[in-house]
Amino acid sequence: MSKTKLLIIDDDDTILNQMKWALKDSYDVFLANDRRKGMDLFRRELPVLVTLDLGLPPYPRDAREGLLALSEMLEMNPKAKVLVVSGNADQKNALEAIEQGAYDFFTKPIEIDEIQVTLRRAAHLFNLEEENRRLKKRPVADSGMIGASAAMEQLHKTIHKIANNNFPVLITGESGTGKELIARAIHQKSERATQAFVAINCGAIPENLMESELFGHEKGAFTGAHAQRKGRIEFAEGGTLFLDEIGELALGLQVKLLRFLQEKTLERVGGRKTLEMDVRVLAATNRDLKQLIAEGVFRQDLYYRLSVVSISSPPLREREGDLLLLTRAFLKRFSEETGKRLKGLTREAGKAIEAYGWPGNIRELENKIKRAVVMADGPSLTVEDLELENAPELPPLPRLKDAKDRVERDLIKTALSRYAGNITHAASALGISRQTFHDILSKHQIDRPA
């Protein structure tokens, strides 16, 4: 497999040789010590990655040659990832380069380990963007997944591994993290990609209508059933069924869904004919299904059937480096939709976005940027456009002692309930002595069983 091409432009031969030695095993490296030679190599080799020193001859003391080279390269290939390098005193020009489209910047002296990590992420992002462009040419919707963080890189690897298996997948994660996008990505990378992707939100449809919505019904099955109707499962034949908010599904329907997953057959409501279905099921939830099982509102056997593979959708706070990447993508999309020619973000707006906690994750970010684009009057989004000044604070963390006491108290109560008040059995199950069990009862003022 050919290496990714990397062009290094710097007027310091020591830095050129140092970087070539450090990076030659991972990249196909090309070197230039001025703008003219760099642009010649850029035109001929079309590198994916570039590191660009802003201070180049004949004006090494300012950034005019470096910024000109950046402009020429991005005009020739906007997809290239250019990392600019500057001195500590030149940070203003480095930030200007970022606003013009540079991927990132570094200050001298260069830390090789740091630049290697950033180059890997830039190359990964380039590959993702190329894949998205290829997907757009297929008769299937683009998954829209954007991100170059380590968390997203691992997520994409997992999706690639499981896409062409037919077993169910359970996608967990906080609200707004893009669980449906993950489901669509699994579908798009699978052999079912040309067939239907059918999504249904289990919490958005009334319980008395949900059975018919999933399994369909026959004419006359109930009042108002004036004609036969296929359910969502039938519409997904040959493709993928996505059950969002699976934790909201009523217990009675959980039994029917379990039977379908086991037998791959269904009967419409009011029908007697058994229909065989070839459908892959993906499910998602932002709730703790194990807790729902303990509360008796979710079937354990259905949980195990759905979670043959579990994927966690990472929250935005755990996706280092993705926040501004997503912001720029949303800004570009909504600017095009509204017909506004917005250049980007002010520096203060960028800082405000990075400082905000984003409890609503990607969905909140998308909505904030959409509104900001609509409200913006200037050439760039401002802090005022974003309306983040009254951002909700994250809830305070409990004291560690309080949290430990609560867990201890709940475990004792659960053990007493499970073993019908038998302290010997309850203590044994928790791995403690009877005396310790009695001490904890007294500590938390839990009534001893009669």
Image (cartoon, rainbow, N blue to C red):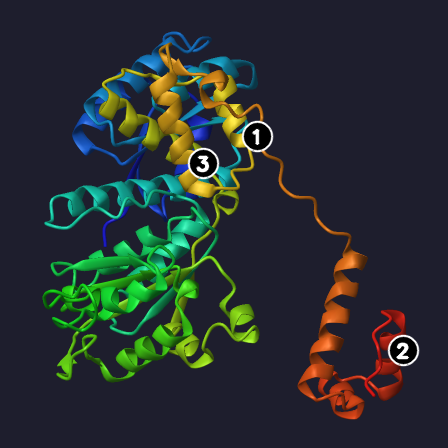
Spatial distance from mark 1 to mark 2, Cα to Cα? Answer: 45 Å
- The mark closer to the camera, 1 or 3, is 1
Q: Quadrant of residue 190?
A: bottom left
Amino acid type, callout 1: Ala
Question: Split into 4 quadrants, where in the image is the N terminus?
Answer: bottom left
Residue picked out by circle 2: 439
Spatial distance from mark 2 to mark 3, Cα to Cα? Answer: 50 Å
Residue picked out by circle 1: 391
Q: Which mark is residue 183?
A: none
Give the image location of residue 142, x and y in percent: 21, 46
Compared to residue 390, the image places residue 414 above or below, namely below
Question: Do the residues under discs 1 and 2 have CB atoms within 8 angstroms?
Answer: no
> Tag 1's secondary structure?
loop
Spatial distance from mark 1 to mark 3, Cα to Cα? Answer: 16 Å
Compared to residue 58, the image places residue 292 above or below, namely below
Q: Is residue 21 visible?
A: no
Relative horizontal placement of residue 189, taking residue 114 as reference (left or right): left
Give the image location of residue 23, x and y in percent: 40, 42
> Tag 2's secondary structure?
helix
Amino acid type, callout 2: Asp
Relative horizontal placement of residue 118, taking residue 418 as reference (left or right): left
Circle 2 packing at 10 Å, graded few (<14), some (14-19), many (20+), is few
Amino acid type, callout 3: Leu
Circle 1 packing at 10 Å, graded few (<14), some (14-19), many (20+), is few
**Residue displayed at 73% across by 67% down:** 407
Relative horizontal placement of residue 121, taking residue 242 as reference (left or right): right
- Tell me which numbered mark, 2 or 3, is placed earlier along the sequence: 3
Q: Is residue 27 visible?
A: yes
Residue picked out by circle 3: 323
- Tell me which numbered mark, 1 or 3, is placed earlier along the sequence: 3
The mark total stands at 3
